[in-house]
Amino acid sequence: MTDATTDAGKLTTADGQSLKKSLHKALRRQKVRALMLIAPLLLFILLSFIAPIFDMLLRSVENDIVPDTIPRTIVALEDWDATSDEAPGEDVFAAFYTDFAIAEEYKSHTRLGSRLNYELTGISSLFRSTGRKVVKFETESYTEQFTAADAAYADPAHWAAWMADDAVRAALPQTADAYDAWSKIVVDLNNDVPSEEVPADFVYTGLYNDLMDGSSVASMPSVDVTAWEPVSLREQFIDANDGWADPAVWSTIKTYGGDYTSGYFLNSVDMQLSGEGVTQRPEDERIYITLFVRTIILSIVITGSCILLGYPIAFLLANLPLRSANVLMILVLLPFWTSLLVRTSAWKVLLQNQGVINDILVWLHIIADDNRLELINNATGTIIAMTHILLPFMILPLYSVMKTISPSYVRAAKSMGANDWTAFWRVYFPNSVPGIGAGSILVFILSIGYYITPELVGGTKGVFISNRIAYHISSSLNWGLAAALGSILLILVLALYWLYDRIVGIDNVKLGG
Amino acid sequence: MASSATDSAFVEFERVQKSYDGETLVVKDLNLSMPKGEFLTMLGPSGSGKTTCLMMLAGFETATHGDIRIGGVSINNIPPHKRGIGMVFQNYALFPHMTVAENLAFPLEVRKIGKSEREEKVQRALDMVQMGRFGGRRPAQLSGGQQQRIALARALVFQPELVLMDEPLGALDKQLREHMQFEITRLAHELGITTVYVTHDQTEALTMSDRVAVFDDGRIQQLAPPDQLYESPQNSFVAQFIGENNTLTGVVKEIGNGKCLVQLDGGDLIDAKPVNVKNVGDRTKVSIRPERVEINKDRLSPDAHTLKAEVLEFIYMGDIFRTRLRVAGHDDFVIKTRNAPDQVRLQPGAMIDIGWLPEDCHALDA
């Protein structure tokens, strides 16, 4: 104890510093060094992998498009009872008209239609067909009557002056809101100056609605709008497409009006959110639970087949002299050196109805020519091809664990009177379990997210959830649903990993030496 | 050795040969006969065939030719698990996934011995090696010496008549090894078990065994009790391998009456005991133990031949002095003298005369 002296129970170094602190200081340099070494990779992974994945997963709950496209409608719908049998009233349609007219300019109404179509089939075409008609609504009669009442209403400069006046804006909130949105369109889309353009019909409609609500502004020419024949926007919409009279459409819009939605996740487990709350989807629309269950069951079967086929090979490998073991090892690794696509295609050739295997079985008179085995485009094909492809991932960890099991264990067991089977089962096998565990985790996690092989040989009965995710990413473009399905898959794998850790213990897994 | 079964023979090797590759013999014509209760050590350098012999006896290797018998019954076609031989392995081979008690219970379990009897036997075996409190531990939680005791207990727990040990103390440090040597011999004698012990450590072989079989080149070079092995080696390999030795080469000049005169290559004449030289003119290696060399002329008979020696190095080793000399052109001639009060400490550079009793100097094959 020359370097460290005890001072009131606390260890200090020779020059009086706390021992803990100085040790910490000494270790910090090492930590910083280690961090610097991994920094480039960490940064690369963070920017190019983790961040995009996180962003992608966020899409599973993101729902900005609805409140961003039709904000006025969402507000107006708050008072509407979603369980009622009637479509909402005139005020909702008025707000919806403004929103729709603006969205039509940006052409965002079709995107909104596609988004809502995920929740209620048919909405997409409803939005698209209405988009063509909304510009021809009879609201232009308001415009004509305003401009006929006073020429100032047709003058862009006057409009710009009115809308710059805070008193006017406060008195005519709908007009101001509509004018702002319109002038933004003029600037953004047409590259024009709002003070030189006549406002669109929906701005005049806003003005009409404001005046009908009893507002009056002294600085604007007075117009008596009460005598005008009102244009019912509700009827205009329903005339354009009677879908708008369906309360289910409005219920869907109201339900999915928030910034975030559980819709994608509910969809992933064959549920839906409607006016009545969370319910199961209709029988014919349920698909994902089946797919998830199939993915898990097939992955378990594949893992099991890999254990059955891989264990004897690994055992042989571990017990052969080094030279022959190396040759055999090359045979095991050979599939790794061939393209995955080539291997899978080879299975197509082998397994198909008129393929090599069926031909041989027919030739051997094991099966009749008109009774050929269905080996492809179903779960059997997926299991066969994926077991083959994932087998090395089982053999390698098994081999590395078996290599460490001393042959003297089995000898000792035999010398104590155990026959070959007992020596294997009671002594060798328990010691090889860590290898089985490691191999199973690898194979199971790989297969649960496998895509190419099920896609090529799985047909409809042998595809995995990942194929559906790929479909939503690249074909249906429903990224939200794809992200939700992916998140569920990720959570599922983590949960299984946790379960495995609880049952087997992750410390018992050896991937090598 | 006797090649046919005698009354006392329990383990017998008869004309046993073993080849792994069909080209070279690892074990060449091995004949060995062991009475019941004997502690026999197979000693030899690595590759001498001793472990192969043990493995053939245990049943993990099959003899290419010849017969191995236990209690008069040929075991060539009996699989290892039916031979009932206890075995202690070099690395102990304790099953890592079982506790100590489960390890010990294993041989009893496969013999379908009931639970209560099993537990009693396991406890007795653990007590026997003073490990009674360790039944619940895993092998990995034990020290090397403790694992060694458990391995020993496991080999003995099913009361085999024959126990094989394959360099069981190789991994232990010196002090522990010496302690375990004593422990193993005590147990073997107390229980009256026949033991075949393989080692490459000659001290271990000498201190533990009733008889030692020295292996080299696939043959038993000599099979004898330790003292005989040390004091009358049959050939120059045994003389070299067991203990420290000084070797001088020369030609036999006279032979007769259990004595011979050897002229060393340098021309000097010395007395020796002929072991495997027969004729005058044979080339020979004479071997003398360092502690049998006499530096006090008065203790030798007047007609004894002596050699001139120059002291090269003196090493103080506590209980003994070790002195290196140049004798007859060899400068690796070593003598050991007891550290007694009247003992002289030879100074490097001094010239002395050395000699020995003729029976201590063995004239062996060249």
Image (cartoon, rainbow, N blue to C red):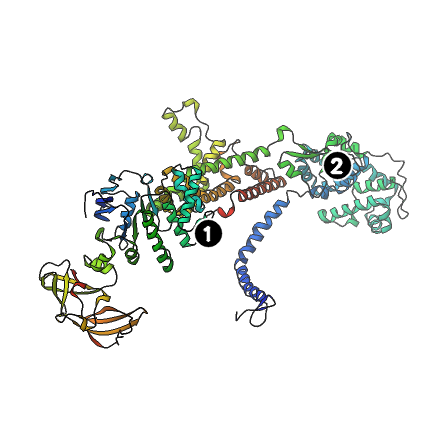
Q: Is residue A312 visible?
A: no
Measured along the vertical axis of the image, is residue A218 above or below residue B332? above
- The x and y percentages for residue B82 are 32, 38
Q: Which residue is mark 1?
A: B141
Residue type at numbered disc 1? Gln
- The x and y percentages for residue B160 are 33, 43
Query: Considering depth in this image, is B185 or A405 the residue closer to the camera?
Result: B185
Q: Which residue is mark 2?
A: A134
Q: Quadrant of the C terminus of chain B?
A: bottom left
Which residue shows up at 29% across the image and 38% down it? B78
Q: Chain of mark 1?
A: B
Measured along the vertical axis of the image, is residue B106 above or below residue B355? above
* Quarter assignment of residue A116: top right
Which residue shows up at 54% across the image and 63% down it? A27
Query: Considering depth in this image, is A335 or B194 the residue closer to the camera?
Result: B194
- The x and y percentages for residue B83 are 31, 40
Mark pair 1, 2: CA separation: 82 Å
Q: Nearer the viewer, mark 1 or mark 2?
A: 1
Query: Considering depth in this image, is B171 or A357 the residue closer to the camera?
Result: B171
A305 displayed left or right of A213: left
Element type where label 1 sits in the image: helix
